[in-house]
């Protein structure tokens, strides 16, 4: 196919030699396999935007239809209604408490989320490295962690509320307990996957167990740890919203479940979008953090 | 700088015997080339000398006493793969040696000691021709550059014994000759005992002061892994034997891989 295309091009340049300008070479038409066809930046942007556009259009049409039938319909509010409800929550102080509700909710939720995920990350790092690197600790803790991993965390929620009360501790603990075991196991696995050549070499250079943790294991697992945190944030939001729905006085999850009673879709939908935005930003920041901390693990992006 | 004595060494993995009745004594400063068919246990032997694995039975003495059953700074190693730390630049890889040696709680040296380590590392980088690559990560170094860095790093650890497991196996022939010259120079400068595994018989003859062939002498057709390999040929090289195509052809026939003519060409290079 390629050969045919090239000969066609040669002919074109010969016949077009009338003296004025050489005709632009017709590009050989080669049909690549689907899996090899490259996507340009522009079309990637376009293609990536399509699903969003599709959902937005479907929503707008459905919403407009419902509102045309019944202007006080609450189920599919118009963008304008949602925007004004959202702006109210963000800028107008609450009548009773005088708080700007959106920011109070966001602050409370993010604090819980980051505290829970932070505790889990610390556990993953310390326990995961200890389990992965030190055979004695592995023998001691790996069976336990493996069993804990299969307990559904939401089933622990009542126990946590009974044992720790309805305060912040129970919510943060739920998030930490919910995401930590999987992270611990993942980091331990990563440490065990370290090429034995590297560990042997570090020892021949005089590394002891502790200095090898600092200079070999820690930097080697850092990219994986950040990936772990990115993956853990999904379940973490789930546990956060579940805990807030049950016992809280502020928070994004609390608000959604509170206004559900009044069918306030004009608040719920923007809140869901807001949570999504927060999650996307967190994820993006983590990718950036990984690139900054472990440039060696991202050779392509670093260029 | 240290002699190695191996007596009656045997190594099995479960039922599979890999090495048996291995006896060898290497005097300080010798350069041993280990050759043998693929999978016959050369790397296993090297890992035992390194301390990464232990023999099933037999005695291994390194320097003044029985081998410590874990890797120590006494013995340096250069692997074919994972030979340097991918998360550190060339310079950082070399600085790491002093950091590890200090053994401090931060795994890092500071102040005057760091400046001195940096000078030493700069000198070593220049010595192996990597001064221009000091801030590159190993992923952006060529195979030959990575191995040069690995050798430099290992030498900064000042080992008495240098172990090499097919260190140049993945390199182009031209680069390989460069590496041979570098290794010979460094060995002459530092005078350590070297044990090098290679599948290139020409390389074995060119670099070593002694060539050891690993092979199985006993075979059980019903159960191929019943017997392990041992040292079947031990040739001390002087100027005459090194250049002799007769010895080279003999070893090549034992190993059954490299064609003697190509091996001769390597030795002559
Ligand atoms: N950890 C291990 N467990 C089981 N068998 C092994 C292990 N390491 C090596 N072997 C076996 O020992 C034999 C020798 O391996 P190796 O020393 O790598 O050979 P060489 O380096 O000479 O090519 C091979 O048959 C291999 O399958
Ligand atoms: Mg091998």
Image (tube, helix red, strand yellow):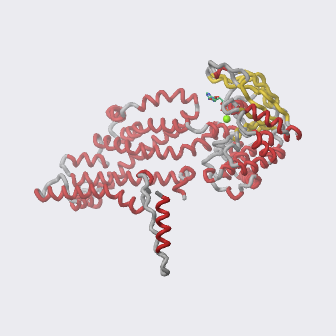
Query: Residue lying furthest bottom in this view?
Result: A20
Q: Is residue A82 left or right of residue B141?
A: left
Residue B70 can be seen in this image: no
Closer to us: A78 or B107: A78
Q: What residue lies at 66% left-to-right and 37% top-to-bottom?
A: A200
Q: Looking at the picture, how far across and down is residue B113, in whole percent?
A: 73, 50
Q: What residue lies at 24% left-to-right and 58% top-to-bottom?
A: A57
Closer to us: B138 or B95: B138
Picture quadrant of ligand 2: top right
Is A14 placed above or below B49 here?
Answer: below
Q: What residue lies at 52% left-to-right and 53% top-to-bottom?
A: A291
Q: Is residue B1 left or right of residue A133?
A: right
Q: Looking at the picture, how far across and down is residue A29, in whole percent?
A: 43, 61
Closer to us: B254 or A228: B254
Q: Looking at the picture, how far across and down is residue A167, in whole percent?
A: 34, 40
Classify residue B51 by image quadrant: top right
Is A41 placed above or below A230 here?
Answer: below
Residue B240 can be seen in this image: yes
Name the quarter where the C terminus of chain A is drawn: bottom right
Q: Looking at the picture, how far across and down is residue B178, in whole percent?
A: 76, 51
Is A138 placed above or below B189 here?
Answer: above
Total labels: the figure holds 0
Q: What residue lies at 83% left-to-right and 32% top-to-bottom?
A: B235
Query: Residue lying furthest left in this view?
Result: A69
Is B229 placed above or below A167 here?
Answer: above
């Amino acid at each position: 196919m390629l050969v045919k295309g090239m000969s066609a091009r040669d002919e074109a340049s010969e016949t077009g030699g009338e003296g004025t300008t050489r005709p632009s070479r017709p590009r050989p038409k080669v049909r690549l396999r689907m899996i090899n066809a490259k996507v340009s930046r522009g079309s990637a942007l376009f293609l990536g935007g399509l699903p969003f556009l599709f959902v937005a259009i479907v929503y707008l049409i459905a919403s407009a239809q419902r509102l045309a039938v019944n202007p006080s319909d609450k189920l599919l509010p118009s963008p304008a209604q949602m925007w004004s409800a959202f702006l109210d929550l963000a800028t107008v102080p609450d009548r009773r408490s005088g708080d700007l509700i959106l920011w109070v909710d966001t602050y409370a939720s993010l604090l819980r989320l980051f505290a829970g995920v932070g505790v889990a990350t610390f556990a993953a790092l310390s326990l995961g490295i200890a389990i992965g690197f030190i055979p004695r600790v592995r023998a001691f803790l790996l069976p336990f962690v493996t069993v804990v991993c299969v307990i559904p965390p939401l089933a622990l929620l009542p126990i946590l509320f009974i044992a720790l009360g309805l305060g912040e501790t129970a919510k943060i603990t739920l998030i930490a307990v919910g995401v930590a075991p999987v992270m611990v196991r993942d980091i331990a696995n990563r440490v065990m996957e370290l090429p034995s050549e590297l560990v042997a070499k570090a020892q021949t250079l005089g590394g002891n167990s502790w200095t090898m943790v600092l200079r070999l294991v820690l930097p080697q697992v850092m990219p994986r740890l950040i990936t772990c945190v990115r993956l853990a944030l999904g379940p973490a939001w789930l546990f956060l919203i579940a805990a807030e729905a049950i016992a809280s006085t502020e928070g994004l999850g609390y608000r959604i479940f509170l206004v559900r009673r009044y069918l306030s879709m004009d608040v719920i939908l923007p809140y869901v979008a807001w949570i999504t935005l927060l999650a996307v930003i967190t994820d993006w920041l983590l990718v950036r953090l990984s690139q900054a901390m472990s440039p060696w693990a991202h050779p392509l992006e670093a260029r | 700088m240290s002699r190695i004595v191996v007596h009656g060494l045997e190594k099995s993995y479960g039922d599979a015997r890999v090495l048996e009745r291995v006896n060898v004594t290497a005097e300080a400063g010798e350069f041993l080339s280990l050759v043998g068919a693929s999978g016959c246990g050369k790397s296993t032997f090297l890992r035992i000398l390194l301390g990464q694995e232990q023999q099933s039975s037999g005695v291994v003495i390194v320097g003044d006493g029985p081998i410590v059953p874990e890797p120590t700074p006494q013995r340096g190693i250069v692997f074919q793969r994972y030979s340097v730390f991918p998360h550190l630049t060339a310079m950082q890889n070399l600085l790491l040696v002093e950091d590890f040696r200090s053994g401090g709680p931060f795994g890092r040296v500071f102040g005057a000691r760091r400046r001195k380590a940096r000078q030493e590392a700069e000198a070593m980088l220049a010595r192996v021709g990597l001064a221009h690559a000091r801030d590159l990560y190993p992923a952006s170094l060529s195979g030959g550059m990575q191995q040069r860095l690995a050798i430099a790093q290992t030498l900064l650890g000042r080992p008495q014994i240098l172990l090499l497991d097919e260190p140049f196996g993945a390199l182009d022939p031209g680069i390989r000759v460069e590496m041979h010259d570098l290794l010979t120079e460094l060995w002459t400068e530092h005078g350590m005992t070297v044990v090098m595994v290679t599948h290139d018989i020409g390389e074995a003859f060119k670099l070593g002061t002694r060539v050891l062939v690993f092979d199985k002498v006993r075979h059980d057709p019903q159960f191929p892994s019943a017997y392990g390999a041992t040292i079947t040929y031990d040739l001390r090289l002087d100027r005459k034997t090194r250049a002799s195509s007769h010895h080279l052809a003999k070893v090549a026939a034992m190993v059954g891989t490299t064609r003697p003519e190509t091996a001769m060409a390597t030795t002559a290079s």
